[in-house]
Amino acid sequence: MPFLYSRGPGSRPRASSASERRRRDLLRRIIVAVCCGCAVWMALQCVMATVATRYVAVAAKDIARGDVIVTGDVSMREVPDSPALDDAVDDVDAAAGMIAQSSIASGTPVFHAMLARRPTVGPGRTSMTIALSSSPDELIVGDTVRLVTASDDDGEYRVLAERATVLDVPEHANDDGLLSGAVGDQSAAVTFALPPRDALAVLQVGEHAPVLAVDADDVDGGK
């Protein structure tokens, strides 16, 4: 009598059991991966909670020396706290309207020492645009310089203005070698705030003698 295999009502095909085991193994792996990810995330949160942070203003793009900073030039970023950041700007509005005293690369924290307020004429002073014989490339708004010209008698210089504050510089100063900064060259026309007496002294010189702007610390006085 031949042997007949009879499958009971509760039994399943062997192929179906193998497929179910694979699904269970895959589900276990997914659960383990999710649990590991959650554990790592929670560990990082615990570490970050113990690190003090602060918000500082950073340059959102490269800012050139002498540029007037607008709101879009800087953005706020959360960084680890450090005593080195005590002088960092902590408000975008505090940087807006200020003048960059040095070049600031994109992503660099902005410090108060890098900025200066835009100067005004102020009481007892006047503004005057002067065509310099010296190159204005190194001047930035807010600089204080001395204006000097050639002396009539001994060939030395004489001081026209002891302290002239730069109010505006040409946006694109042309540098043409020996011709750069020639007398009357409008590319070298710089606007200064200075006392009326000094302004009159500059007017008397007119275009007949060169006018140079020099660092106030480089000149010891008129000669």
Image (spheres, grey):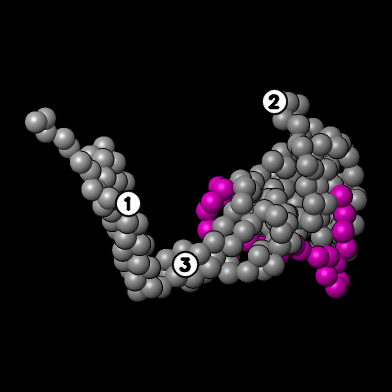
Q: The residue tagged with tag 2: helix, strand or loop? A: helix
Query: Does 167 sit left or right of 115 as displayed?
Result: right
Residue 93 magenta-highlighted: no
Residue at 31 percent across and 63 percent down: it is: 39
Q: Which residue is mark 3?
A: 85
Disc 2 vs disc 3: Cβ atoms closer than 8 Å? no
Q: The residue tagged with tag 1: helix, strand or loop? A: helix
Mark 2 or mark 3, earlier in chain: 3
Query: Does 208 sit left or right of 139 as displayed?
Result: right
Mark 3 or mark 1, earlier in chain: 1
Which residues make up the magenta segment? 104-129
Nearest to the observer: residue 184 or residue 156? 184
- Residue type at numbered disc 2: Gly
Q: Which mark is residue 177?
A: 2
Task: Point out residue 157 in the picture as x, y percentages from the top left corner.
Answer: 71, 47
Task: Point out residue 178 in the picture as x, y percentages from the top left corner.
Answer: 71, 25
Q: Quadrant of the N terminus?
A: top left
Q: The residue tagged with tag 3: helix, strand or loop? A: helix
Q: Which residue is mark 1?
A: 27
Foreground tag (3 vs 1):
1
- Residue type at numbered disc 1: Leu
